[in-house]
Image (spheres, rainbow, N blue to C red):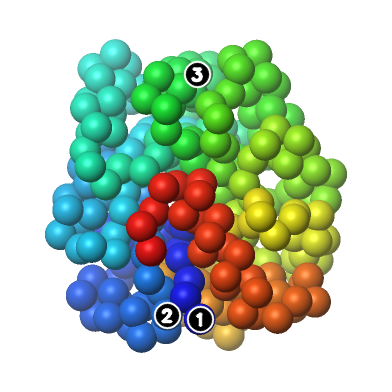
């Protein structure tokens, strides 16, 4: 089986990166997308994508860092987005759970990066926490980019239906495997196979049976297995569908 880890943070892995990439390859992970959340991590994502053929990058300013977003930061993100293996703007969005940045700054940074994704004709990878309705409202006001990826989906079935109505791809991480996460499994059952993605969000959210250990891209196969169990479908079908969707949504060569 071939897998794509559509969202990981390779710059934050505790394990040595070459070893982690080797383990991922042995687990069938043919490609992974390492995510920018601020200027340093966006630059590092671009650097890693230039070094490893199986690695792609996104660039963007996370809502936690929205207070730092200004015209100069936006211009630098736009410059980085022109690099050959940058496949999306992200992760961007709204987070009203932790609110490391105030709501006004978050909305401002999100709005600017929505426009950037549209101008560059790039997909947009979204972080949403305790802010789903606000994100949808802002997207509707702005006329969203053509391709939206709802990263580490944390809503239930109604939110999944709304994401699909927006034309989005819905990406599930390791928490879909947790015993307490029946709402995520219900959401997954709403998502047609051609709009489904899987990710690790590593080094965070290790799936069962790796909970309590640092996460790695190789574990995307376990995320896929949990999604397959929730949908009552063969794991091979989920691997094939999510890999095809990553190619289509993010323009990956796998």
CA separation, marks 1 and 3? 39 Å
The residue that mark 1 highlights is: 1
Residue located at (47% from left, 36% from top): 123
Q: Are marks 1 and 2 in contact (CB under 8 Å)?
A: yes
Q: Residues within 10 Å of mark 3 (few under 14, many from 20)?
A: some
* Residue at 66% in and 55% down: 194
Measuring 61% from the left and 34% from the top, which residue is drawn there? 96
Q: Position of residue 173 (x, y in %)?
A: 58, 63
Q: Which residue is mark 3?
A: 111
| Mark 3: secondary structure | helix
Q: Nearer the viewer, residue 209 or 47?
A: 47
Residue 120: image quadrant is top left
Q: Earlier in the sequence, mark 1 or mark 3?
A: 1
Count the labels in the image. Answer: 3
x 77%, y 72%: residue: 230
Residue 219 position, x and y percent, is 48, 77
Q: Secondary structure at mark 1?
A: loop
In the drawing, does residue 80 fall left or right of residue 174?
left
| Image quadrant containing the C terminus | bottom left
- Direction from residue 214 to residue 16 in the image, left or right: left
User: Mark 1 vs mark 2: which is more N-terminal?
Assistant: 1
Which of discs 1 and 3 lies nearer the camera? The answer is 1
Describe residue 245's horizontal placement relative to residue 55 as left or right.
Answer: right
Dot label at residue 28? 2
In the image, residue 14 above or below residue 28: above
| Left or right of 31, for residue 249 | right
């Amino acid at each position: 089986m071939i897998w794509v880890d559509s969202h990981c943070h390779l710059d934050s892995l505790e394990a040595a990166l070459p070893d982690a990439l080797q383990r991922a390859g042995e687990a069938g992970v043919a490609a992974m997308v390492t995510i920018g959340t601020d200027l340093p991590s966006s630059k590092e994502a671009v650097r890693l994508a230039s070094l490893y053929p199986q690695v792609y990058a996104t660039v963007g300013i996370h809502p936690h860092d929205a207070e730092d977003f200004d015209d100069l930061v936006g211009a630098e993100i736009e410059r980085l987005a022109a690099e050959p293996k940058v496949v999306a703007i992200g992760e961007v969005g709204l987070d009203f759970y932790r609110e490391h940045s105030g709501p006004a700054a978050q909305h401002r940074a999100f709005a600017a990066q929505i426009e950037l994704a549209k101008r560059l004709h790039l997909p947009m990878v979204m972080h949403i926490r305790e802010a789903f309705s606000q994100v949808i409202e802002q997207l509707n006001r702005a006329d969203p980019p053509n391709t939206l990826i709802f990263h580490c989906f944390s809503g239930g079935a109604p939110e999944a239906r709304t994401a699909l109505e927006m034309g989005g791809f819905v990406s599930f991480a390791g928490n879909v495997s947790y015993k307490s996460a029946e709402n995520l499994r219900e959401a997954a059952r709403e998502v047609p196979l051609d709009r489904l993605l899987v990710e690790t969000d590593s080094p965070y959210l290790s799936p069962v049976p790796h909970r309590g250990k640092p996460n790695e891209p190789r574990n995307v196969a376990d995320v896929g297995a949990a999604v397959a169990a929730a949908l009552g479908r063969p794991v091979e079908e989920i691997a094939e569908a999510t890999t095809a969707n990553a190619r289509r949504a993010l323009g990956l060569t796998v």
